[in-house]
Amino acid sequence: MLAALSSSAVGLHASGSLPLRARVSSNGRGGPVVNTIAVDSTSEPLPFVSLTNAAGDTAKAYPFGACVTSYVKGGKDALMVRPDAKMDGSKPISGGIPFCFPQFGPGAIQQHGFARNMVWDIAEQTDGDEPTIVFKLSDDEYSRGMWDYAFEATYTVTLGTDSLDTTFKVVNTGDKPFDFTAALHSYWSISGISNIKIAGGFEGASYLNKMVDPPATSLGTSGTIEITEETDAVYQGVSGAVELLDTGADSKLTIKSEGWADTVLWNPYGNEGMGFDSFVCIECAKALEPITVAPSAEWVGKMDVIPAPLPKKVQSWYDTGLRLAAV
């Protein structure tokens, strides 16, 4: 199945095993580096990569879709995989941080593009206190059948001391410009949908409400959003820092972005099969206006994820029902 999805993706051999890549063997002072990146090709249907930093935090990612499915800091996983997710390569992984590229959707090609369906190569890996892995995807017959452009995409994931840092880079390796839209369709773990608020630059921002037919544009009325119904909204120009505040988990998750221009909020409110009450999608995106990349040029989008305890002052504002925007 995986080989059929991407015959040129070299992460998987015909046997279905993922080759180990060369590792850093020196810490710069002549001593060995402890291997903090491990590739497991046997314990699950899909190969995966595990990262562990000096603090004991962990992350897990699959070359299939270059999908990060877990980021555990201080014993708490910031990410969630839906209970209905297929983890055998038969469908894109519904959970963690799936890719939407080269189409956010809907559009001319398959919903959310092909990057989440393909096996990415492991281009680089660096052990150490803050381990880093780089996934790479290039055009092939499968991708060109839908989107006839030459490209190279890399996705760098670093398990830092205080954050999980990602960099997505798209290079035009062909001789004609191309346009694309994209997003990191991130599923953030929550204690319950009624326990959360999402704080950011939403007040006054134009957003596309995709829950009405036809989709309609409105203006945000508050800098803080609660999810009380099925939600699918694209906030144009909202980026930088967005906070997920969860009283049930006593946590604040800051999602910082550069290059990504929009923020998408999604939750299938009421859908028990999808596990609506255990996640919310807050997605760094370039969804409404396409990115144009000239031949030999590149585009870069960065997302840093920073977990922290919920500040006591914010907790008190929850308790009194006042707006977090005033904090």
Image (cartoon, grey):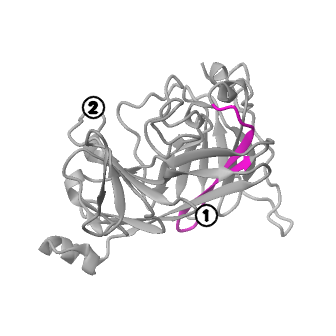
Residue 321 on the magenta span: no
Q: Are marks 1 and 2 in contact (CB under 8 Å)?
A: no
Please state if 252 lies on the left or on the right of 277 as rendered: right
State the residue at coordinates (36%, 30%).
84
Q: Quadrant of the N terminus?
A: top right
Marks counted in the figure total 2
Q: Which mark is residue 138?
A: none
**Mark 2 nearby-residue class (10 Å; few <14, some 14–19, many ≥20):** few
Magenta-highlighted residues: 147-171
Q: Secondary structure at mark 2?
A: loop
Q: Amino acid at mark 2?
A: Gly
Task: Please name whichever residue, 37 or 187, is drawn nearer the observer in this view of the structure.
Answer: 187
Which quadrant would the C terminus be assigned to in this image? bottom left
Q: Which mark is residue 54?
A: 1
Q: Position of residue 52 (x, y in %)?
A: 59, 54
Report the disc number at residue 273.
2
Residue 63 in view (yes/no): yes
* Residue at (55, 46) in percent of width and height: 181
Helix, strand or loop under label 1 = loop
